[in-house]
Image (cartoon, rainbow, N blue to C red):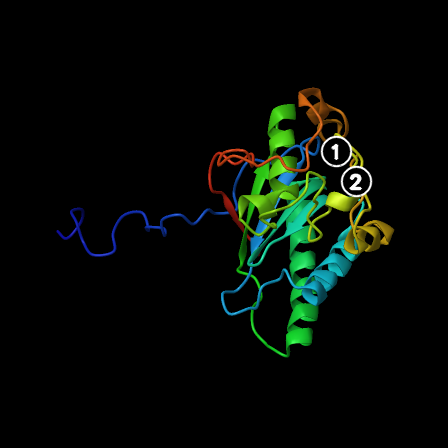
C-alpha cells in the first residue's frame, strides 16, 4: 500500500517560465552571433563619454583567437555585439570575461559594488545574408531605434557609442565634418575585422547600409528569446 497515486512534490520538477537552460544546439563557427547584455537597473546610463570609453577599452582587450567582436553598440541599459566564436564554450568564456572586465572597471569608476550584469545573456545565430545585414543595421543604428539619436540629424550622422566609425559597409564614406567625428575617426579601432563569409561578403548581396536606415521591430535577427546562463 502507499505506492502510486498523487502526492505532494511528485512528478517532474517545474522550471521557471522563460528561463532557458544551457543544454542547447551547438552554433557552428561559420555563423556570426548577435549577443545582448543588460546592466543593473540602479546604474547610470552607459551612454556617457567616460563610461563608454571604459567599455570600449574592455572590448578592445576581449579579442581572442576563438572569440572576436566585430560590431557593437552601447545603449543606456544594455550592450549589443556581433561576434565570431569558435564554439558555444568559446562564446560563453569570451562573454564571461568581457562582463568581468567591464564590471570591474565600471564599478571601480563609480565606486560601487555588486553585480553589473545579470547572469544571463541573449545570443542568436545569424544564418543568412539578409539576417546578418538586418542584425548589423540593428546594432549600428540602434540609437535611432531607441530614440537616442538627435532628432534633427543630417544624412551622415553616425553613433559615436557604436563601432560605426570602423564599419566599411556604408553606402557613402563617413564625412569628418564635426569635431567629434574627426576625433572618433582618429581613434584606433576597438573591434576586429570580420573573417566569416556572412560578415565580409554575404550580407552585402542585399546592399550597403545608409546612415539613416531604421531597423524594423523584427530586423535584429531574433526569432525567440534564448537567454544563456553563465556557469
Residue occupying image coordinates x 73% and y 64%: 54
Asked if marks 1 and 2 touch (Cβ < 8 Å), the reply is yes
Q: Position of residue 10 (x, y in %)?
A: 25, 51
Q: Which residue is mark 1?
A: 170
What SS does tag 2 mark? loop
On the rendered image, what quadrant is the C terminus found in?
Answer: bottom right
- Depth check, front residue: 1 or 127: 127
Rendered residue at 55%/61% (across/down) = 39
Q: CA distance from mark 1 to mark 2?
A: 8 Å
Q: Position of residue 64 (x, y in %)?
A: 79, 49
Residue 134 lies in quadrant: top right
Q: Residues within 10 Å of mark 1 (few under 14, many from 20)?
A: some
Figure check: 186 above or below 71: below
Q: Compared with residue 218, is residue 59 higher up or lower down, i.e. above or below?
A: below
Q: Is residue 41 shown left or right of residue 175? A: left
- Which residue is nearer to you in this view: 69 or 207? 207
Outermost residue on the bottom side: it is: 111
Report if residue 36 is visible in the image.
yes
Q: Secondary structure at mark 1?
A: loop
User: Residue 186 location in percent, x, y?
Assistant: 87, 52
What residue is disc 2 on?
Answer: 174
Q: What crowding class fits label 2: few (fewer than 14 Cα within 10 Å), some (14-19), or many (20 or more)?
A: some
Judge from the rendering whether residue 127 lies leftward or rightward of residue 14; answer left or right.
Answer: right
Tell me the mark number nearer the camera, choosing from 1 and 2. Answer: 2
Q: Is residue 69 visible?
A: no
Amino acid at each position: 500500500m502507499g505506492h502510486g497515486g498523487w502526492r505532494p512534490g511528485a512528478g517532474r520538477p517545474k522550471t521557471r517560465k522563460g528561463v532557458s537552460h544551457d543544454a542547447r544546439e551547438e552554433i557552428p563557427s561559420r555563423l556570426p552571433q548577435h549577443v545582448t547584455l543588460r546592466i543593473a537597473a540602479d546604474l547610470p546610463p552607459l551612454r556617457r563619454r567616460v563610461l563608454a570609453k571604459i567599455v570600449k577599452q574592455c572590448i578592445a582587450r576581449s579579442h581572442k583567437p576563438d572569440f572576436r567582436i566585430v560590431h557593437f553598440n552601447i545603449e543606456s541599459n544594455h550592450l549589443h555585439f556581433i561576434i565570431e566564436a569558435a564554439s558555444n564554450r568559446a562564446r560563453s568564456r569570451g562573454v564571461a570575461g568581457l562582463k568581468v572586465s567591464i564590471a570591474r572597471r565600471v564599478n571601480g569608476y563609480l565606486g560601487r559594488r555588486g553585480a553589473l550584469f545579470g547572469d544571463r545573456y541573449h545570443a542568436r545565430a545569424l544564418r543568412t545574408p539578409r539576417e546578418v545585414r538586418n542584425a548589423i543595421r540593428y546594432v549600428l543604428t540602434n540609437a535611432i531605434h531607441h530614440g537616442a539619436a538627435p532628432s534633427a540629424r543630417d544624412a551622415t550622422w553616425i553613433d559615436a557609442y557604436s563601432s560605426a566609425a570602423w564599419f566599411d559597409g556604408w553606402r557613402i564614406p563617413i564625412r569628418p565634418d564635426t569635431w567629434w567625428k574627426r576625433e572618433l575617426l582618429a581613434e584606433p579601432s576597438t573591434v576586429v575585422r570580420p573573417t566569416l563569409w556572412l560578415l565580409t561578403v554575404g550580407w552585402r548581396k542585399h546592399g550597403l547600409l545608409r546612415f539613416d536606415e531604421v531597423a524594423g521591430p523584427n530586423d535584429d535577427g531574433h526569432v525567440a528569446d534564448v537567454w544563456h546562463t553563465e556557469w
